[in-house]
Amino acid sequence: MKQSLSMILAAVTALLLVACGKPAPIESVESLVANPERLKELRAQCKADHAKVGDAQCNAVAEATRQRFFGSDGPKYTPPSSLPTSPPTASAPAAPSPAPPSAPKE
């Protein structure tokens, strides 16, 4: 009995040590931006099984995808060179909309 209890205790200790192991290292956003093939592969893995790949890696994949699409500075907004002074006006009144068809009476 004492021997089986010590074996169970050793097995539980081993399982706890395995469960508390280091998480897999994630690939950085910069490395993914520089390697589009790896980015494509990880995007597919995140889409297929997000929980298995992990939030941290999938967030890095999403950020790398965003940077490759918009560039590292993000989207650029260029306002128009001149703004209109007044809102546009309609030259003719709008035509009335046709009346909806009436339902047949029973």
Image (cartoon, helix red, strand yellow):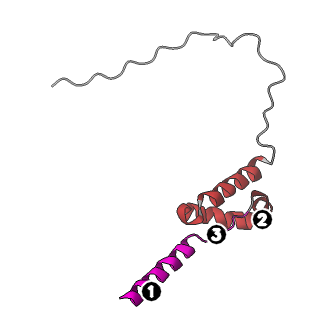
Give the position of the N terminus as an image quadrant. bottom left
Residue 11 belongs to magenta span? yes
Residue at image location 84% in from the left, 23% down from the top: 81
Label ID, residue 22? 3
> Foreground mark, 2 or 1?
1
Q: Position of residue 27 (x, y in %)?
A: 72, 64
Give the position of the C terminus as an image quadrant. top left
- Towards the viewer: 96 or 21: 21
Residue at image location 61% in from the left, 71% down from the top: 21
Q: CA distance from mark 2 to mark 1?
A: 48 Å
Numbered range of the magenta stretch: 1-27
Q: Position of residue 17 (x, y in %)?
A: 56, 75
Badge 3 or badge 2: first in the primary sequence: 3
Residue tagged by mark 2?
A: 35
Residue count near mark 2 (Cα–Cα under 10 Å), binned few <14, some 14–19, many ≥20: few
Could you tell whether 79 is left or right of 12 in the image?
Answer: right
- Kindly indicate whether the residue at mark 2 contacts the one at mark 3 (C-beta within 8 angstroms): no
Q: CA distance from mark 3 to mark 2?
A: 25 Å
Q: Is residue 106 above or below residue 23?
A: above
